[in-house]
């Protein structure tokens, strides 16, 4: 039944290849679908490897927790103390930004810096030097805004304390102890396996010309692995750390540190945390160049699920599949996020007009008759994040501040919200990130 629904919904959402992995009742099941690349036609198999993107952040978070437990680090240590000479932002907040701020995306750094600092072992070190000139949206700890750069900084802290690259620490601290045979961080390792290739959104479901992000992004999002390996890693947390982390240190990662605006739940120490049907849920998503990954853990049920896809439209597949799978497998209902409500009438939308900007993307907002037209203009300078798109957004409630829309019925819903930053500036909040009006 699940294999049939995976195939049916993948076809509906134009996802060429996917793997659904489930750990339940001390049993692993892996269901592959489709092809790893439409160009080669090679079938997806159970041990095909996919980029898990930002799910990597929980691995970096786990290594950080190990260092804390070893007494070599504290969550409230500042970056100025850990990385002498580092400058963060034009007003240099290194003395005010802590490890906890980085783990909880509350540093205020405008953190989607994807500059390529080369393939050498010094890529992360060089990247940190770029952060002296980034903008900051708010004071450390004042709010939440998703920050890739924060986890690269954590990767650099791990490198300095361990005296080796982040990749090597990952192998020594997690990959080898867990016996993960299909978990890698570099393209030359991935191509020795059945490796998925990212594909564009429909209607042009073709492979991207770029396979991965720059090496420096590793600690924030460059693990490539199989579903079985990802669920073995998940079991480390389901088992409260096993021999690699104490139960107290593991469960501390699950404690909500602050809420995530417009989402169901909040952020722990790298994990997103929520409650579904009274059940604790740990989660993280990942997105790279045309690959989307989902990981969900229900510790009180000993249950974990991952969905790995090779399509930029993987969110749409997950949006349809996961609400069906969870009630069937574990008896838990996935809560719904707000959708456009035709009965809602909103006025005064002119207050939202203008351009909102954050690192790598501008949003042009044009009010209409009870709706907003939002044009997204990416300028990251890397393949896979270069498509200008206009989406009609409709209100999800009567506040006139929350909206949802999607370019096409086969794609996932995109949600935005308008609010005010602590310094009084208007902001657009989307994809977990703050974009101030300019």
Image (cartoon, rainbow, N blue to C red):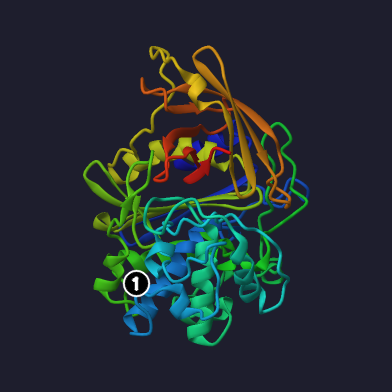
The quarter of the image holding the N terminus is top left
* Quadrant of the image occupied by residue 16: top right
What residue is at 68 percent from the left and 46 percent from the top?
385
Q: Nearer the viewer, residue 96 or 188?
A: 96
- Report helix, strand or loop for mark 1: loop
Q: Is residue 51 left or right of residue 93?
A: right
- Specify few, some or many for label 1: CA neighbours under 10 Å numbering under 14, 14-19, or 20 or more: few
Q: Residue at x 28, y 76 (%)?
A: 246
The picture quadrant where one finds residue 67 is: bottom left
59 or 8, nearer to the observer: 59
**Farthest left residue in view:** 278
Position of 63 with respect to 358 (left or right) is: left
- Residue indicated by mark 1: 76
Q: Position of residue 335 (x, y in %)?
A: 33, 36
Query: Which residue appears at 56% of the width and 28% of the height?
Result: 406
Q: Is residue 198 visible?
A: yes
Residue at horizontal 51 percent and vertical 55 percent from the top: 136
Please determine whether, in this image, residue 352 is positioned above or below residue 156. Answer: above
Image location (x, y in percent) of residue 2: 45, 41
On the image, the x and y values in percent for residue 267 come to 36, 54
């Amino acid at each position: 039944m699940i294999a049939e629904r995976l195939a049916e919904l993948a076809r509906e959402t134009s996802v060429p290849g996917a793997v659904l992995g489930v750990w339940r009742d001390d049993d692993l099941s892996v269901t592959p679908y489709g092809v790893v690349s439409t160009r080669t036609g090679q079938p997806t198999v159970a041990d095909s490897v996919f980029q898990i993107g930002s799910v990597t952040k929980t691995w970096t978070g786990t290594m950080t927790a190990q260092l804390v437990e070893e007494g070599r680090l504290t969550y409230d240590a500042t970056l100025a103390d850990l990385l002498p000479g580092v400058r963060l932002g034009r007003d240099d907040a290194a003395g005010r930004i802590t490890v906890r701020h980085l783990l909880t995306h509350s540093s205020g750094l405008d953190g989607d810096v994807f500059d390529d600092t080369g393939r050498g072992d010094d890529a992360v070190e060089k990247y940190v030097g770029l952060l002296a000139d980034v903008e900051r949206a708010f004071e450390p700890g004042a709010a939440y805004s998703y920050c890739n750069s924060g986890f690269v900084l954590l990767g650099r802290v791990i490198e300095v304390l361990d005296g080796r690259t982040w990749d090597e620490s990952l192998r020594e601290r997690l990959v080898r102890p867990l016996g993960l045979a299909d978990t890698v961080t570099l393209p030359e390792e991935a191509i020795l396996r059945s490796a998925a290739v990212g594909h564009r959104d429909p209607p042009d479901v073709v492979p991207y010309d770029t396979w991965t992000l720059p090496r420096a992004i590793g600690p924030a999002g460059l693990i490539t692995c199989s579903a079985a390996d990802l669920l073995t890693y998940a079991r480390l947390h389901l088992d409260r750390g096993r021999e690699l982390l104490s139960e107290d240190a593991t469960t501390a990662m699950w404690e909500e540190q602050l809420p995530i605006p417009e989402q169901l739940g909040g952020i722990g120490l790298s994990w997103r945390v929520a409650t579904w049907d009274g059940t604790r849920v740990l989660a993280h998503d990942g997105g790279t160049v045309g690959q989307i990954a989902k990981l969900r853990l229900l510790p009180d049920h000993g249950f974990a699920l991952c969905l790995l896809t090779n399509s930029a439209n993987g969110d749409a597949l997950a949006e349809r599949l996961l609400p069906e799978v969870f009630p069937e497998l574990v008896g838990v209902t996935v809560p719904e996020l707000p959708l456009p409500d035709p009965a809602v009438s909103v006025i005064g939308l002119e207050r939202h007009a203008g351009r909102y900007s954050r690192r790598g993307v501008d949003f042009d907002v044009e009010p209409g008759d009870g709706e907003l037209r939002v044009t997204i203009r990416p300028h990251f300078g890397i393949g896979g994040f270069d498509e200008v798109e206009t989406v009609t957004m409709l209100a999800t409630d009567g506040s006139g501040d929350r909206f949802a829309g999607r370019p096409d019925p086969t794609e996932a819903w995109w949600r935005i919200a308008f609010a005010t930053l602590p310094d009084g500036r208007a902001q657009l909040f989307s994809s977990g990130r703050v974009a101030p009006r300019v």
